[in-house]
Amino acid sequence: MVWALGLMSGTSLDGVDAALIETDGVRIGRMGPSLTVPYSPELRARTRELLDRAAGLAPDDAEVLAVTRELTLRHVEAVRLLREKASGLEPAVIGFHGQTILHQPERGRSWQIGDARLLQDLCSVPVIHDFRSRDLENGGEGAPLVPVFHAALLQQEQRPVAVLNIGGVANVTVLGAQDQHGQRGVWACDTGPGNALLDDWALRHTGKPCDFGGALASSGTVRQDVLEELLAIPYFTRPMPKSLDRLSFHSEAMAYVRDLSAEDGAATLAAFTVEAVARTPFPVQPETWFVAGGGRHNPVLMDGLRRCLGNVASVDVLGWDGDALEAQCFGLLAVRCQRGLPSSWPGTTGVRQPCIAGRAL
Ligand SMILES: Nc1ncnc2c1ncn2[C@@H]1O[C@H](COP(=O)(O)OP(=O)(O)OP(=O)(O)O)[C@@H](O)[C@H]1O
Ligand SMILES: CC(=O)N[C@H]1[C@@H]2OC[C@@H](O2)[C@@H](O)[C@@H]1O[C@H](C)C(=O)O
């Protein structure tokens, strides 16, 4: 096994998560330390601006290049701080996801900005990057990629279970029951919004970047009529696998809630996240749901999920760090790439055949 350092900057645009993981690409050994390096409000705003304009931007646009450099330097800082924290643990490889500013699987396109060469030169560690392209080239959605990691972590689990990540977008991995040979089905998709719509709503109505503790949503009432209109968006009846951009149906959804009070709008958007999960057409019904990502800190989301799905717990009950999971995943994916192991399958991304994620420089 080797130590791999994973870097993930998610759709919430709040910063870079970095984590160390010991793995041979198949088995997972020890988890090392992890940390988050936040983006400055200025960098967050500039990145958000790019994300809003991404469909019309050229790769060599001056602002794209400037933000790419800034973001990469935040990643370099994350690597430096994590190495300091992990004194003595030297990573053999870095898995660098980059910042997604556009995801259009229907056009075979997913755009992560980040300068892998600069990161490799400044950190002096081999970097694996560009994790989504090959999957897209082979007919896949390019996301989610985390199911291989969830399956590796839950190798001992015999029952059908699900891991739900509620980041900016929410994604789920469903693991079927194990047969007598230890084989099981693995299915995945993005279920719908995670926190992104709620974050934008909270920012507009409270000036804060999210609905901390679900305070706003818990003092409002869900508008069922609006909720049903939101859930009538065709994405929700599409079979899995399927994936989303942070801005997928963003303006549509915002138009539906626009006239609601701040509280009712937040309650309705939180219910939207929950119902989108509950209505996903799953091939098997999970007995237990383990929830990761920032959304697990929002009691309105967690209570709603419990009401709809039954047995729902934070991944923390498994001893996992729900804030470091995605960064750890990109450490694992980097090692799998180096060893020629596939990381996506027809059931997880819709790719035609099992596919290696990432490439070296
Ligand atoms: N205490 C809290 N109360 C309410 N919401 C919270 C709290 N802490 C975090 N969140 C939510 O979690 C979000 C961040 O989640 P996370 O870091 O998992 O997203 P991400 O990794 O950027 O997204 P993705 O998984 O889509 O790439 C915040 O934007 C916020 O909405
Ligand atoms: C294109 C992109 O960056 N997608 C992210 C996003 O954030 C959550 C969800 O949408 C998921 O599909 C994916 O990230 C995780 C790490 C994944 O690929 O598994």
Image (cartoon, rainbow, N blue to C red):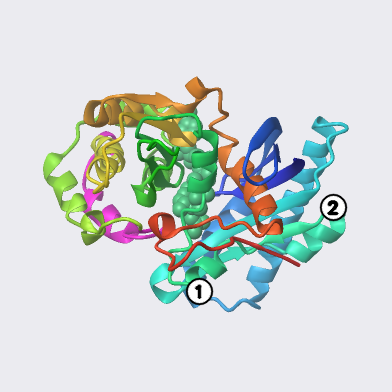
Report whether the residue tagged 2 is closer than 8 Å to ligand 2. Answer: no
Q: Is 10 within the magenta?
A: no
Task: Identify the mark nearer the N-term, 2 or 1.
Answer: 2
Q: Residue at x 43, y 71 (%)?
A: 139
Q: Residue at x 24, y 49 (%)?
A: 281
Q: Measure the C-alpha gap from mark 2 to mark 1.
A: 30 Å
Indicate which disc residue 123 carries: 2
Indicate which disc residue 137 carries: 1
Q: Position of residue 22 (x, y in %)?
A: 71, 37
Q: Please, what is the three-letter code of the amino acid marked with disc 1?
A: Glu
Q: Residue at x 41, y 34 (%)?
A: 211
Q: Point out the residue furthest to the left here.
A: 225
Q: Which residues are magenta?
A: 242-263
Disc 1 crowd rating (10 Å Cα; few below 14, some 14-19, many 20+) is some
- The quarter holding residue 116 reads bottom right
Disc 2 crowd rating (10 Å Cα; few below 14, some 14-19, many 20+) is some
